[in-house]
Structure formats: C-alpha cells, structure tokens
Amino acid sequence: MRRRRPLCACTPVLAAIVALLAPVADALADAPPYDEETEREAEGEVVIVGLDRAPGRALVIYPTRCTDSLRILSLREDEAEDAPRLAERAALDRDDFAEVVEGAALEVFDGDNYCERSGLYAVPRGPVLDRLRTATPQERQRLFAEEATILRSTIRLPSPAPVVPIRSRLQSVQETLRVLGVAADALILGVESHRYTFRGGQVQAVPIGAAARPELPRRSLPEGAIAAAGAALPGWEERVLKDRSQGTGDREAAERGDAAPAEGMSDAATATGDAASTAGEDGPATGGATMGAVSTGVATTGVASTGVASTGIASTGVASTGTTSTSTASTDAASLSASGARAPAEDEARESTEDDAEAEPPDRRTRLWITALIAGMISFGALAMIRRDRRGRR
C-alpha cells in the first residue's frame, strides 16, 4: 500500500499569512485620500440659485452616482464584450443624472477610482434634453463629453466631505452658488455665500461674492471681517462678469480648480493674511482646508483686494477699476490683527482646552506597516520551512 505524503508542516503558517494580509489589503484599498493624522472630513452641502439667468436651459448634475454602467465604461476593456453587460444594466442605471431645482441641496458624488466628481451642466431644453433623458448610460456619457451645446460650469462643485485640519472647529459648510449667466463656452457661476457651523453649535453666514471659493476657516471669523465682506457684496455679480471678460488666466485656473494666489491683493492685506495664517493652531488662522476647488482669486484690473480673503472670505475687489482701496485694506488689516483680542479671554481658553482635549485618531498607517512587516517575516519563515521540507523529501 502506497503511503500518503504528509501535508507540509508550514500549512498553518500559510493560512496565518493569508489571514493577516487580507485585512491589510482591504485597509489599503479603503484608505482615505488625506492624512488621517492631521486631517479629517467635515460635512459639505451646495445649493444653486439664480436659475433664471440661464433662460432656455436646464441645469443638470452628472453623474449623481457611479453606476455599474459607468464603471464598465471607465475600464474600456473591449466594446464588443462590454455591449451585453451595458445592455443589461441600461434600464437600471438611468438615474445617473438629475435636474437642479432652485435652492435645493444637490446630491454631489465625490468621485472614486471609476467615476469623476459630479459636474454641473447647462443643457438646452428641447431635443438635446430629451435625448439626455432617453439615452443609454453610454450614449449619455458621450453626450456630456461631445455635445457642444451642453456647457459645463466655470466652478467645480464642492466636495460633500471637505477635508479640514483635524483640530479645526469647523463641522459643516453650506455653499450657495449663483448662476450669473451663460457664455458661448461655459455656464458662469459665482460663490455667493458660505454658511459655517462650528463645534458648539455656532453658525456664521458669510458673504463671499467671488468667482472662486475661498479656503475654509478653522474657527469662527471676526465679526468685523464679516461686516466688511457684506459691505463689499453689492455689485459683485457685475464685477465677476467683467473680470471674466477682461482676463483669462485666473478664469482658466478657476475652471480647472487649481490653486493660485488672488491677484490685486494689497501688501497690507497680504501681510495680514500671512500673520493670521501663522498665528498658531488656536489663533484666528483660517488654515488650508478646501471644498474641492481651491480659491484661485479673480482677475482684476488695478483693483486691490480687501483683507477679507485672508480670513476665509473670498477676495471681492471692492475698489473701483484703476484705483487702490487702501482704507479697506487698512481697516481689514487692523480688524484681523486685533481679532485675537476681540474674543473674551475665557472663551479663548475654553476653546484651546477643547482643542487640546480632542482625541486624535490612532495612526492607521503605522498599524498597517507593522502588520505588513509581521506578515513579511512570517512569509520568509514559511518559505524557509518549505525549502527545508522539500530537501528532507529528497
């Protein structure tokens, strides 16, 4: 009778390796696109107003989710092989776009490995909109990409989960975008206002009035800065449209969502912003959080920006063309430099204590590396055992 070969002695070790590596792979695949040691997600929301400025057009958000059809199309493996799967999913994946309702919160998809973030489009009512509604997911994707009459917005929609510094007091932000008009190549939008909610329930409504969104504040803004921004708000739509018609550099940066410094900022305002941004974690800094498209500023012609941009309020350019508003910049500089003294001392101490007491999440990446190192050591040991077992059989 032929003797049966015993199982390799390393079988339990190999099973342990598989058990260890599986969660590591899953964790790495699910790792967020930001540094968990220093950053976290806040809540974001966006509403659109002024739809009457786009007559004869419907505003459409696309995609509202990453459907199976869009995942298949993103891989682009083989059109012939993909056709049956796309036909099977066509009826189930028709809800990948939605028409915008005035003042209603948008369902923004943040993008993933297969689909890009939701975009906002102006679609002509009539045959084009009808085709969009009845098209298959593949045809609809082609329409958004190739149809010349479908215009994309000049501002990228903000993330529904904006990333902020981990010690930021900001909990959520609601952005209001206003339709300013329709150009030959784009749907022109402007950021009208932000509504911030901070830890402790404090809410601030901040006028923006700019062609690009500003950085998000880490803590509540000085009342003087908000008042200055409100005073500069009248006529901001006309200024944005004029700046877009006169300059292209900042407009192109805003459309791409690239970071660029605001032009026309006076030296006083710039110095104030630098001082505020380096004031420390518990100072009045606004600190580098964005909602997906960083503040790029607005192209201006000899216009000095107010100092409000340094506090998380967009550069509005309140001065008239060809002049420099030194009084506004000086006022904002003074209000910002004194903002730390404006708050009561006990409130500052309480907020600092709360920030220090806030629990920081464990270093997830360190745990993953340790687990991977252990798994690697076990793997080397298993390979050595396998080689020794094979030599013994010989």
Image (cartoon, rainbow, N blue to C red):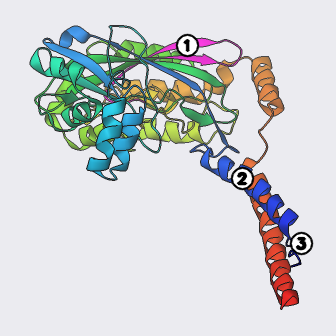
Q: Which residues are magenta?
A: 195-213
Identify whether 387 is placed above or below 293: below
Label ID, residue 204: 1
For label 3, count other residues whose C-alpha is less than 10 Å away and answer few (under 14), some (14-19) or many (20+): few
Residue ID for mark 2: 22
Q: Residue at x 56, y 45 (%)?
A: 33
**28 left or right of 318 in image:** right
Element on which disc 2 rests:
helix
Looking at the rendered structure, the kind of residue marked 1 is Gln
Q: Position of residue 345 (x, y in %)?
A: 77, 20
- Secondary structure state at the residue bearing disc 1: strand
Residue 26 image position (x, y, % from top left): 66, 48
Is 203 covered by the magenta stretch? yes
**Residue in front for this viewpoint, 55 or 311:** 55
Q: Quadrant of the image for the N terminus? A: bottom right
Q: Residue furthest front?
A: 1
Residue beneath disc 3: 9
Quadrant for the C terminus in the image: bottom right
Among numbered discs 3 and 2, the one appearing first in the sequence:
3
Q: Residue at x 37, y 7 (%)?
A: 103
